[in-house]
Image: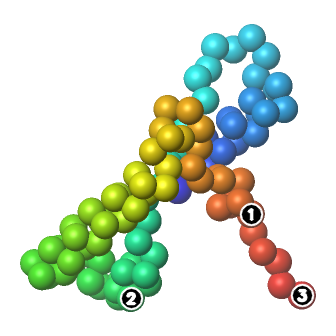
Amino acid sequence: MADLRAINFVKKLDAEDRLGDRAMKVPLIHMILDDTLMNDLSARSKMMPEPGMLTRMKEAGRVAADSFLNDHADALNSSDTVDLSALFTRVTVG
């Protein structure tokens, strides 16, 4: 997450034209997620998965990757498919 925060910071500086003449390539960021599976798993199962769990995670990853490619293949090498600034925006309560 720290690396993504750093990339988000550099992207923000680039958007504000604050990088000056520095030669810096701003990376394109993509995320392939399976929130449903990951939210169903306990912390223990993520740290010490059983062989059956690894198979389940591998299949879920393949399905998520296929879905990502179906939805975003045209964005690869041209634009981000995730909004990092939204990812790191904190919601305040009350």
1 over 19 or under it: above or below = below
Q: Which residue is mark 1?
A: 89
Residue extending farthest right = 94
Is residue 55 at least partly visible in the picture? yes
Q: Residue at x 37, y 81 (%)?
A: 37
Q: Residue at x 43, y 65 (%)?
A: 33
Q: Are marks 2 and 3 in contact (CB under 8 Å)?
A: no
Q: Are marks 1 and 3 in contact (CB under 8 Å)?
A: no
**Which is nearer the N-term, disc 1 or disc 3?**
1
Label 1 is placed on what type of residue? Thr
Q: Which residue is mark 2?
A: 40
Q: Nearer the viewer, mark 2 or mark 3?
A: 2
Q: Nearer the viewer, residue 63 or 57?
A: 63
Q: Are marks 1 and 2 in contact (CB under 8 Å)?
A: no
Q: Residue at x 70, y 42 (%)?
A: 9
Q: Marks 1/3: CA distance? A: 16 Å
65 over 12 or under it: above or below = below
Say what secondary structure mark 1 lies in. loop
Say what secondary structure mark 2 lies in. helix
Say what secondary structure mark 3 lies in. loop
Residue 85 relative to residue 49: left or right: right
Q: Is disc 1 surrounded by few (<14), some (14 to 19) or many (20+) residues within 10 Å? A: few
Q: Marks 2/3: CA distance? A: 29 Å
Q: Which residue is mark 3?
A: 94
**Residue 89, quarter of the rendered image:** bottom right
Place of residue 40 in the rendered image (x, y in percent of width and height, measured from the top left): 38, 88
Place of residue 31 in the rendered image (x, y in percent of width and height, measured from the top left): 48, 55
**Which is nearer the N-term, disc 1 or disc 2?**
2
Residue 45 relative to residue 51: left or right: right
Label 2 is placed on what type of residue? Asp
